[in-house]
Image: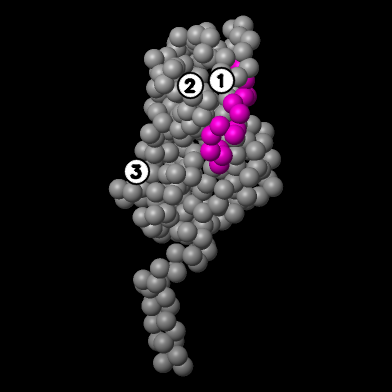
């Protein structure tokens, strides 16, 4: 009997000390903390999604670091201790995938959005397409930095497709991320800019002037994935699964996103 107990204790000790990477996929039974790096375009909706998720999973706490997708991806690339990444486009997620920095099977698209041209609320503007911007109605047009901010990348793609990138380039003011784009429009520091539909419905100080034809840019998709540096793949995967749930979809739609 004593030998049996010794062997049992040894087995438990070996399991606890195992370096098997698959151990990170075992569901946690204790309170755990996850760090999520997320595109700033989700800063209005994710708090509600996370609150609902944590109510269903009270042992999991999620902290979010918001920012431009490009900057967040570069931080992960440099070893930031992030468990989950939500990008505002596929390109930055592709970069991490190419460097084996995300768990390939965990990658999923869970939401979409609509690019819109918007101005400060209360302004009387009556144009309905990108081509009308050639009329010179707007002296200052704000967009996110195309190199790091997905909303800026989509805006640049649309303008290039409409052959307006060069003709209008003198009017552009670049913001570091979507949040700054919205702030510039709200304050009236610019005439108009490119944001998502979800941003327009979150504030009464910004009004949509017209939706941008989605054929002019890449699909606006929001992918999520677990990073390979994460030490808790199981609980991270629970959150990825929740993002695809009906409950999460309802919250996303309330904030102007569409379900993937």
Task: Give the quadrant of the C terminus.
Answer: top right
Q: Could you give the CA–CA distance between mark 2 and mark 3, rounded to whole angstroms?
A: 30 Å
Residue 168 is one of the magenta-drawn residues: no
Mark 2 or mark 1, which is nearer the start of the sequence?
1
What residue is pinned by disc 2?
164
Q: Label 1: state its secondary structure.
A: helix
Q: Quadrant of residue 252?
A: top right
113 horizontally vs 175: left or right: right
What residue is pinned by disc 3?
74
Bin the neighbour count of mark 3 within 10 Å (Cα to Cα): few under 14, some 14-19, many 20 and up.
some
Instruction: Provide residue 187's location: percent of width, then percent of height.
Output: 48, 12
Q: Could you give the CA–CA distance between mark 1 and mark 3, rounded to whole angstroms?
A: 32 Å
Bin the neighbour count of mark 1 within 10 Å (Cα to Cα): few under 14, some 14-19, many 20 and up.
some
Farthest residue to the front: give it. 163
39 horizontally vs 204: left or right: left
Q: Label 2: state its secondary structure.
A: loop
Q: Label 3: state its secondary structure.
A: helix
Comparing labels 2 and 3, the label whose residue is closer to the camera: 2
Mark 3 or mark 2, which is nearer the start of the sequence?
3
Instruction: Provide residue 235's location: percent of width, then percent of height.
Output: 52, 57
- The one nearer the camera, 131 or 128, is 131
> Residue visible at 60% across and 19% down?
129
Task: Identify the disc placed on residue 130.
Answer: 1
- The one nearer the camera, 52 or 1, is 52
Q: Is residue 226 visible?
A: yes
What span is colored magenta in the figure? 201-221
């Amino acid at each position: 009997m004593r030998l049996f107990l010794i062997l049992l204790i040894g087995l438990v000790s070996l399991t606890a000390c195992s370096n098997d990477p698959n151990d990170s996929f075992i569901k946690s039974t204790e309170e755990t903390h996850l760090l999520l790096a997320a595109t700033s375009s989700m800063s209005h909706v994710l708090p509600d999604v996370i609150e609902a998720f944590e109510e269903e999973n009270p042992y999991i706490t999620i902290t979010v670091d918001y920012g431009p997708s490009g900057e967040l991806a570069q931080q992960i690339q440099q070893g930031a201790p992030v468990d989950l990444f939500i990008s505002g486009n596929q390109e930055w997620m592709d970069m991490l995938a190419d460097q084996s920095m995300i768990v390939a099977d965990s990658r999923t698209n869970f939401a979409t959005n609509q690019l819109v041209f918007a101005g400060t609320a209360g302004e009387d503007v009556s144009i309905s397409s990108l081509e009308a911007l050639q009329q010179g109605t707007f002296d200052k047009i704000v967009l996110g930095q195309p190199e790091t901010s997905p909303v800026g990348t989509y805006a640049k793609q649309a303008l290039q497709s409409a052959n307006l990138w060069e003709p209008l380039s003198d009017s552009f003011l670049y913001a570091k991320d979507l949040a700054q784009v919205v702030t510039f429009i709200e304050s009236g520091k610019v005439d108009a800019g490119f944001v998502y539909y979800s941003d327009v419905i979150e504030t009464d100080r910004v009004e949509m002037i017209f939706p941008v034809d989605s054929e002019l840019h890449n699909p606006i998709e929001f992918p999520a994935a677990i990073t390979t540096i994460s030490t808790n793949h199981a609980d991270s995967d629970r959150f990825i699964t929740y993002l695809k749930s009906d409950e999460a979809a309802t919250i996303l739609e309330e904030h102007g996103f569409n379900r993937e």
